[in-house]
Image (cartoon, helix red, strand yellow):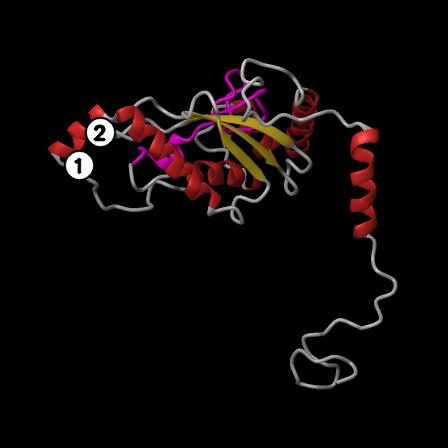
Amino acid sequence: MEFNKLSTEPHFLDKDTEDSLVKYHPVFTEYTVLAEYNLLKEQCKLLQDTYVMPSAKDPLRWFGLIFLRTGFYTGAVFRFHIVIGQNFPHTKMPIPTIMFTPPIFHPKVDPVSGCMETKSAFGKWEIGIHHIWHLILYIKKSFLIIDETNCVNQIAADLYTQHTSEFHKHILESIEECKEHLHDANMFSTDIHYLNFSSYNPNIHGTFRKVILANAKPNSTLKTKPLSWVKPGSLDPFSSERS
């Protein structure tokens, strides 16, 4: 999960370009953030089950949600923010901050601030090499492959390496806590781009639920059999029993 070796080519800006960046910094920042978001959308398959939206009030703060379906964190729905530095992308900058709210139980996540450790994976943020979607991929992989090195939650790291069952118990508690606070209002929830949830209402959501479940049932009227890789007793590929 190292993102600090994506490229070794240096990136330089001439003096005129640097002067222009300073003068038109706010406009350029907004354009760059939009470009970063467009790059992220191109990675929708790779970043499946993660949802991210820049704030309508502050383009340097992004709201995120991740749904986890495998591994220790199966069934989790975690809310996170990405906070980008004010000078983005004018100069080499610190890595944008990833913050989980509420803090989650993970070796790479500070149990008090909710901030995720990223320096060990990225080194120093390089303009033109690193992108915001790399951060989101790092989040996703961190839940699938637990890395106890360079941790910021030593208790989580020790339990993972020494007491797996206890580690999993704490994770389940963290998952339940996050679900309980999923609908909480906060200083960002009035932002029109904030990823809000409404509580389940059978009068509103029940109809859609029934349709989804009905479509998920196997179709008993289907008469044709699916194709197999190889017909039994034959070397013909993609053949059916009737071929």
Identify the residue at the far top of this view.
187
Q: Quadrant of residue 235?
A: bottom right
Q: Quadrant of the N terminus?
A: top left
Amino acid found under the numbered disc labelled 2: Leu
Q: Residue 21 — which label?
A: 2
Q: Residue at x 62, y 15 (%)?
A: 185
The percent coordinates of residue 228 (x first, y second) are 71, 74
Q: Is residue 162 magenta?
A: no
Counting residues from the start of the chain, the first of labels 1 and 2 encountered is 1
Residue closer to the observer: 58 or 78: 58
Q: Which residue is mark 1?
A: 13
Q: Which corner quadrant holds the C terminus?
A: bottom right
Q: Is residue 181 above or below residue 2?
A: above
Q: Residue at image x 81%, y 45%?
A: 211
User: What type is the residue that disc 1 sits on?
Assistant: Leu
Q: Which residue is nearer to you in this view: 33 or 225? A: 33
From the top left corner, tell me how far across and down residue 174 is, in percent: 65, 24
Identify the secondary structure beneath mark 2: helix
